[in-house]
Image (spheres, rainbow, N blue to C red):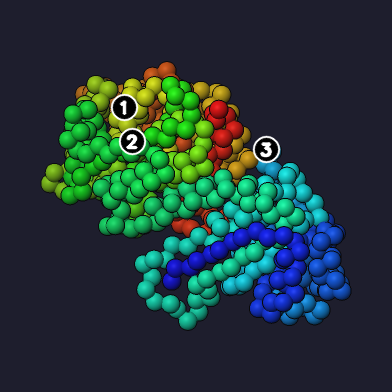
Amino acid sequence: MPQTVEIVFTSIEDLAARAGRSESATLVVFAGEDLAQSHATRNLLGPAAELIGRAAGAAKFKGKTSSAMDLLAPSGLKVARLLVAGSHPSKKPAAGAPPVDYLSLGGSVMGKANGATDILVLFDLPDWNGDPASAAADFLGGMKLRAYTFDSYKTKKKDDDEKPSAVSVVIGVSDPEAAQRSAQSRLAIVEGVTLARTLVNEPPNVLFPDSFAERAKALEALGVKVEVLDVAAMQALGMNALLGVGQGSVHDSRCVIMRWEGGKEGDAPVAFIGKGVTFDSGGISIKPAGGMEDMKGDMAGAACVVGLMHALASRKARVNAIGAIGLVENMPSGTAQRPGDIVKTMSGQTIEIINTDAEGRLVLADVLWHVQNQFKPKFMINLATLTGAILVALGTEYAGLFSNNDELSDRLFTVGMATGEKVWRMPLGPAYDKLIDSKFADMKNTGGRHAGSITAAQLLQRFVNDVPWAHLDIAGTGMSSPQTDVNQSWGSGWGVRLLDRLVSEHYES
Ligand code: BES
Ligand code: MN
Ligand code: ZN
């Protein structure tokens, strides 16, 4: 059943008053190193503060982040439940990561409060890093991300389903107006992540190229210019590599170009390009049946680009940005592309198809070329669930980063550590590039068993001239990645927070 979650800020005084009169609420307070509590927390708890010290030993609670202690019917308080959450860094943060990540803290608290319908948070910590208003905004964002659900296709409520249908959260902070102001941009990002997750989670009979394009079109309401190229328009442009992938499907291919013009007129845009294979059966080189349903998520790159454009537009980012996605369904049929086919890309270069399951690079080849020539961007970053081999190399912790530019790579690495959406740079070079030379065409679409993620990236690079470019292989992070404090969804929405931060830190005027 769908769940609604409402989260608002209030003053610490109002929060205390609410806690004093509600018998059903779960009250959340924080304790740090040596169970230290803030002045406001001790004030609110009064004699009940003593409970924390008494229970902590038995609960093995040491005030560390990601841990919490649950006290039911706490004596001396009206509320039904007191949840004491840790605010002291549980381990030395990774280089570049904040000491306490308030987004994760919000996610963790939302998780610990599971099942509660009426949550009161006294967000006054014994220890802070940075500005409390911005911390509160992050905390709220983390709660929202954790609360994300995708259950619109479940029609029956199970008996053991503990999820309430409506949750109300009130967060008490010292300056609610400042927190609310900070929260505006965070909420824009949360909405973008939510949109990306939902697109990835949607089933492939519902989300196919045309219906995906419709969802991108909805960004017009935010002031984004959205152009949808249909098959005829792509034929006219010569995007035959992209079209070849979709030719076996009853669903026609699309390419969607989104433009957000929030920067100075005439300022070169930043460009994001996404692989949008709405279902990847492998085509004639068909995949094994086991787990094939996961290939509904083979559009996670495109989902991230749409989510990012949503975030940039709704927070009115002062930047010119292009989002371009290639939408196709890769299916076997009598009209499907064959191994042995040779396609002529928009760039004029030809590609021999060795394996129809190496389709993402074919889609991106044409979209990269088009974006580079049409928009002369400052940089191009593409995202793609491109290779299973990146899971072998990096697992689900880091996305693979391939780039022709050290500055762009360094920036991506740094914002990756700060946001927790981490990237690890992989090599490119002429020796790898040689592996995709073809006997019959300019190149072939697979490079053999070794270095599968790199040879895929080398093919993309053949469609990029001098523009700074980065390719993020998100096959390990975009879907079915490990659940975290801020993500319990199969489709993670990976990359929206990373790229939003890249833009806000380096490219906004
Ligand atoms: N979409 C897949 C890659 C993938 C695998 C994404 C697992 C997410 C999870 C891609 O189109 C693909 O099939 N790649 C092949 C390439 C091979 C045929 C050269 C692969 O990785 O096996
Ligand atoms: Mn494939
Ligand atoms: Zn694919």
Question: Looking at the image, is 499 positioned above or below residue 429?
Answer: below
Visible residue check, residue 386: no
Name the N-terminal-most of marks 1 and 3: 3
> What type is the residue that disc 3 sits on?
Gly
Instruction: Judge left or right: residue 54 versus residue 378.
Output: right
Q: Give the number of the mark in front: 2 or 3.
A: 2
Q: Residue at x 18, y 42 (%)?
A: 247
Which one is nearer the viewer's eye here, 372 or 290? 372
x%, y% of residue 135?
69, 49
In the picture of the structure, the residue carrying the numbered disc 2 is 257
Label 3 environment density (alpha carbons within 10 Å; few <14, some 14–19, many ≥20) = some
Q: Secondary structure at mark 1?
A: helix
Q: Secondary structure at mark 2?
A: strand
Question: Looking at the image, is 462 positioned above or below residue 44?
Answer: above
Q: Residue at x 59, y 36 (%)?
A: 415
Q: Secondary structure at mark 3?
A: loop
Instruction: Judge left or right: residue 15 versus residue 481.
Output: right
Visible residue check, residue 376: yes
Which one is nearer the viewer's eye here, 263 or 494? 263
x%, y% of residue 468?
47, 23
Name the N-terminal-most of marks 2 and 3: 3
In the picture of the structure, the residue carrying the numbered disc 3 is 96
x%, y% of residue 325?
34, 38
> What type is the residue that disc 2 sits on?
Ile
Question: Looking at the image, is 238 positioned above or below residue 334?
Answer: above
Q: Residue at x 85, y 60 (%)?
A: 39
Quadrant in which the C terminus appears: top right
C-alpha separation, residue under disc 2 versus residue under disc 3: 34 Å
C-alpha separation, residue under disc 2 versus residue under disc 1: 10 Å
> What type is the residue that disc 1 sits on?
His
Name the N-terminal-most of marks 2 and 1: 2
Rendered image: mark on residue 370:
1
